[in-house]
Amino acid sequence: IGYLTALGRVARQMTGGGIGNVGRRRKQLPRVDKEVVTFDSVAGIDAAKREVAELVALSSQESAKQYLAVGARPPRGVLLVGPPGTGKTLLARALAQAAERPFISCSGSEFVEMFVGRGAARVRQLFERAGKIAPCVVFIDEIDALGRRRRESNFAVGNANDELEQTLNQLLACMDGVDPNTGVVVLAATNRLNVLDPALVRPGRFDRVVKVPPPDLIGREQILRVHARKVALGSDVDLSSLAKETRGLVGADLAAIINEAAIRAARRGAALIGK
Ligand code: ADP
């Protein structure tokens, strides 16, 4: 794509947070994330954004008092459901940023262990950490890795099954123990709501479900615009026609297109300078 002329600062976030980080994640679970993401940088998924933004107000100390006053229970867990790359992690980060709280994140697959009890201990560790630094936002990506329906995982024999079940039970117990009045909000993400154990989505656990669908035409254009802000854009770039040509792509794909174009532009620029 020869759309972009020169490369400004290619955002670290486009390439960061990818597969390369997985190894590091395992060792330092649970980690507090310092990356700054605001709601401004989340585009094209307005309904989901609105619902998550509402939580900022709901999770403030004042509103906690209001809830208590009328005997209502503030939301404890929110499940973000949508295909990979649609911006679920981004939304969770933006929530933490807007509520001015530390963001602790981990992936469900990090809790899947070979040895019985190890996964459950990791879940406990996560919630203990959250309790210590409360108020905070906890984000569990790929929750389906540990929250599968128990019946379905019965095909696994011996240890594997016990382990998954113990980990899930621990997660359920920890969710029940979360006191929303201390300001711990737990968000989790999955692509497959139907494989989750129904106990996880019962009231008092992940009882709010926010759908994060792939963006439509207008959404794609908005996402392209957000990412184009970070690069030097050629005057002949037509983002609305690019949005038309990218049907079916999600935010992560669109960010990658802009980045790829910027890289090529930089390479071309470098070649010119070299001559
Ligand atoms: P998910 O958690 O749904 O798999 P991420 O939130 O990790 O997806 O998205 C990966 C990257 O893709 C983000 O860091 C961002 O650069 C880009 N992205 C995805 N969705 C959006 C969006 N709605 N608006 C802007 N950028 C997005």
Image (cartoon, rainbow, N blue to C red):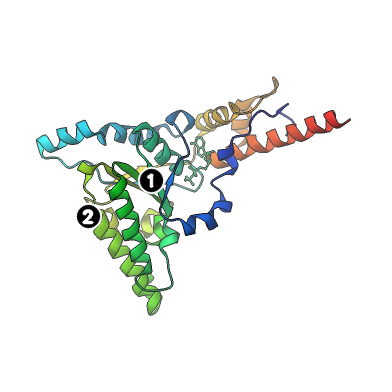
- Residue at 47 percent across and 41 percent down: it is 87
**Secondary element at image label 2:** helix
Mark 1 within 8 Å of ligand 1, using the beta carbon: yes
Residue 148 visible, this orientation:
no
Residue 236 visible, this orientation:
yes
Q: Earlier in the sequence, mark 2 or mark 1?
A: 1
Across and down, in percent, residue 223 comes to: 53, 32
- Residue at 16 percent across and 34 percent down: it is 65
Q: Is residue 223 left or right of residue 196?
A: right
The quadrant in which residue 255 appears is top right
Q: Is residue 202 left or right of residue 213?
A: left
Residue found at the far left of this picture: 70
Q: Is residue 69 left or right of residue 226?
A: left
Across and down, in percent, residue 227 comes to: 57, 31
**What residue sits right under mark 1 in the picture?**
80
Seen from the viewer's position, the closer of residues 36 and 19 is 36
Q: Amino acid at mark 1?
A: Leu
Q: How many numbered marks, from 0 up?
A: 2
**What residue sits right under mark 2 in the picture?**
176
Across and down, in percent, residue 64 comes to: 19, 36
Across and down, in percent, residue 116 comes to: 36, 73
- Residue at 29 percent across and 56 percent down: it is 200
Distance from the alpha carbon under mark 2 to that under mark 1: 19 Å
**Secondary element at image label 1:** strand
Which quadrant, please, contains the C terminus?
A: top right
> Does residue 170 sit above or below 211 in this rendering?
below
Residue found at the far right of this picture: 275
Residue found at the far bottom of this picture: 158
